[in-house]
Image: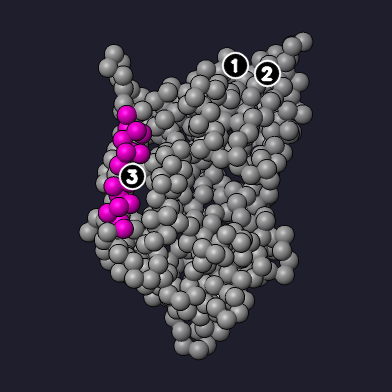
Amino acid sequence: MRSVRTVAGAIALTVIGALALTGCGGGDDHPAKQAHSPRPSAPVSAKPTALTVGFYGSSDEIAAYKQAVDNYDAAQQSVTLTLETWPSAAAMMSDLTAGKPAPDVFLSGRGDLDVLEKDKLISPVDELLAARNVDLGDAYSREALEAFSADRHLTCMPYAATPQVVYYNTDIVDFATMSAEGLATPGNLDSGRWTIPTFAAAVSWASRPAAGIRAFSLPKTVEGLAPYLYSGKGKVVDDESQPTSLAFSDPSNQNTWDQLLPVLSGHGAMLSDRQLKKHTALQWFEQGKLGMLVGDRSLVPELREHPGLHWDVISLPSVSGTTTIGDYTGLCLSAHTKQTQAAADLLAYLVSKPAVSLVAQSGFIVPVNTEVAMSDDFLQPTQQPLHAKVFVNNTRSMHILPIPSETLATLDGQVGGLIGQLLKPGADVGGTTAEIDATSKPIFGALNASLSPSPSASGSASANGS
């Protein structure tokens, strides 16, 4: 199992030029110049090539992806596309690992690559994309390319990132007024960096129990606490390459618990269990009753539907260094597709600047194409949030949990209650964290057993690049 992979050498790609809207064919006509007429790699025939493309997310997110898919489908006469969707990455992986055929081209989180490779569900995409003039030069960060690279090949094409940030109500957490009163505030809102003591000042300022306003909501999940443990130079799992247990009780985390838990367990700091039974944290935030909320870019479109709500984004508070968690998503090519060239044409179109820009305009994704990420298609300066660059900056400090999405969902279901106990005043930190770690061991045991090669196998894809 991998955390963040490194490339043993240069990825075997020829960087030729930027891909335009439909620069997908591999012939001599240089189709990258044909900005509005994607060409298939095969001649038009009476019977179009049938391809499936898969995405996961909310219905609104799927609608954004569908715009790009429909554009390609409408421009092609030789291809017909069928869209397959799932509500989450975990739901998709559950289907694929149970034997459901993978779509010809599909979205995947980097954290699920070990499972996809172990089950031999994906094929490298580097040579196919190079033949279609896809530019992997300055348009993509090294981190994004490394995340999807192994054995000098690109296993999937980087597409977007999901760094966790703090959304804050600027009427409740008013940094300008706090600063005028001599309280600690973040120094640079574009970078979004701030410390636990500065966060504590914001929590104290925003907490107004008498008015029904709480300061902060932390998800009671492994993902909710992980970024602070990493930021404090501690451990989330016992082994980043092949975890066998959570490591919340590890001594390296003591400083983080000492700094963070007193802030979160203060009176009126967090939404209560009773409040969370009545409304979700997002709903409390939308009602103007919650100062700060953790989430990724996918929350932006929904929050914009509340014109009277004033909000912005900032990084997660730092213990010793700015760190967040999240995942890269990439577009993968099924190892079992019967239409490799046509599927590669589609993949090349979906990662082109115009196609990614179209999806970025919906507000849901943080594109890893740096040109799109720094454009108005993503930053959208006339709309909230004002400091959208925080998403891009946080991608650079994003730690990817070395835990597949299905396993994370299982862990959260098993240890969520214990994490809730940890956040209460006077919690037995040592005993509770030890119980969390012990509860996680059989879950990791089942994961590692599923990733192990069979006795008769000569090797396993999951061992490569570990």
Tell me if residue 438 is in the magenta stretch: yes
Q: CA distance from mark 1 to mark 2?
A: 8 Å
Q: Amino acid at mark 2?
A: Ala
Q: Secondary structure at mark 2?
A: strand
For the point 67% across and 29% down, the residue is 83
For the point 32% across and 38% down, the residue is 442
Q: Secondary structure at mark 1?
A: loop
Q: Nearer the viewer, residue 81 or 440?
A: 440
In the image, is residue 373 above or below residue 84?
below
Tell me if residue 362 is in the magenta stretch: no
| 11 to the left or right of 206 | left
Location of residue 439 in the rendering, given as x and y in whole percent from the top left corner:
33, 46
The residue tagged 1 is 339
In the rendering, which numbered label is found on residue 440? 3
The residue tagged 2 is 50
Q: Quadrant of residue 419?
A: bottom left
Q: CA distance from mark 1 to mark 3?
A: 41 Å
Q: Amino acid at mark 3?
A: Ser
| Range of magenta residues | 432-449
Q: Residue furthest bottom?
A: 181
Q: Amino acid at mark 1?
A: Gln
Reading the chain from its start, which is encountered first: label 1 or label 2? 2
